[in-house]
Amino acid sequence: MLVRDGKILAAGPRKRVERRPEAKHAETFDVAGRVILPGFVDSHTHLIHAASRAEEYELKIQGASYEEIARKGGGILNSVKKLRAATRDALKARAAAALGEFAAHGTTTLEAKSGYGLDVASELKILSLHRELNEEQPLEIVSTFLGAHVVPAEFRTKPGGAERYLSLLMDQLLPEVVIGDLAEYCDVFCDRGAFTVAQSRQLLTKAKEHGLALRLHAEQLSYTGAAQLAVNLAAASCDHLEQVTDSDVRALAKSDTVATLLPGCDFHLGLKGYAPARGLIEAGAIVGLATDYNPGTSPTMSMPMVLSLACTQLRMTPAEAIAAATINAAYSLRRDHAIGSLEPGKQADLAVWEVEDYREIPYYFGMNLCWMTMKRGEVIHMKD
Ligand SMILES: [Zn+2]
């Protein structure tokens, strides 16, 4: 592979690449037979949050469900309380450390959602941190506005609280996000205990009018019809999908909406009902994979672990899983022209793996065999 100015100039058999005139004075970097893949594109994360929820992890192991914990003020609202109390510097330091971990596991681009602020100031604080981190460190961050994560506590006690919160999102927050150019995407958590399909449609339609592209948390804990909504609104991605029906699978297959699967969530919550990856792939849907890095349901920055889960639990082949975590995820972020594969003209975003065969990456589960990570031609992680 020949890299110049952060981009791939040529890729292919050594002889052909070395014959290029530009190769003559190039600095050589020998990876000694290791496997090179495109850098992972993690298309679903909740990067900015204040703390772990290890205390809830223990309750879940003892038998409390995610929704029971949420009803008692735990869950997302617990993270909201912690985020509102955290300083901007503390949030930034925690996210920066996480970004280092993402890079160390071969990720070169990630999507990041707001959604633990749920008031104007806190949501804007998160989104502006996305921008700041994108500028100040090498990983590329794609910002998503998820003000509609859940209805915040202060609105739950008011009559028509959910509707009033939605109005706040549509009339105050969304225009600020757009004017400040703070997000490319708008997302909604459409599920039992969060927002209904009608509410989601209302907000996403408004976001679309403002020029934002759409993503949607759909069919995770309960069946709502959100996947069909994502397809109808031509969303870039529709994520989770544990509860999808055959007709949803057919609709996704006919659409350009990426079906992004997040098996880390089911694994962490100890749930057995993984999304029907095989059905989606066989129907012709575009399947993506992401970590869903977040403190409540998927505390991991490891895409290799997600690949292991995709192979053993979703029955995806290693090649399907890698495509889902690279080029398909890049498509869901509308960056497939620039990232997601090792082709001339694309950014030199790649990861080198200490394996002899790419299948060994998911095969050795719970291990990190990433040897080196490169973003736009710069080494951003090197195993010591
Ligand atoms: Zn999520």
Image (cartoon, grey):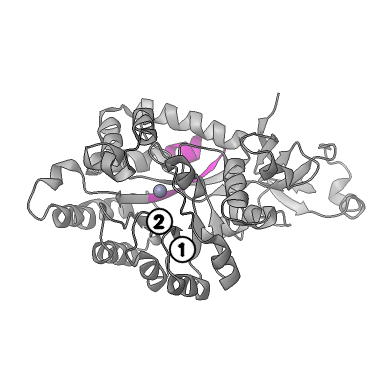
Dot 1, how many residues are within 10 Å of its Cα: few (below 14), some (14-19), or many (20+)? Answer: many
The numbered mark, 2 or 1, whose residue comes first in the sequence reads 2
How far across and down, in percent of the image, does residue 120 sit?
A: 23, 44
Q: Which residue is mark 2?
A: 185
Q: Residue at x 64, y 34 (%)?
A: 367
Q: Is residue 133 magenta?
A: yes
The kind of residue on which mark 2 rests is Tyr
Left or right: 220 as drawn, with respect to 253? left
Q: From which residue to which does the magenta span run?
A: 132-144
Residue sitting at the far top: 384
Residue drawn 35% across and 45% down? 114
Quarter containing the C terminus: top right
* Cα gap from disc 2 to disc 1, whole angstroms: 9 Å
Q: Secondary structure at mark 2?
A: strand
Image side of residue 249 versus residue 106, left or right: left
Image coordinates for residue 134, horizontal then vertical, percent: 48, 40
Q: Is residue 117 visible?
A: no
* 337 to 96, vertically: above or below: below
Q: Is residue 358 above or below residue 51?
A: below
Name the residue tied to disc 1: 236
* Secondary structure beneath label 1: loop
Q: Are marks 2 and 1 in contact (CB under 8 Å)?
A: yes
Disc 1 marks which amino acid? Ala
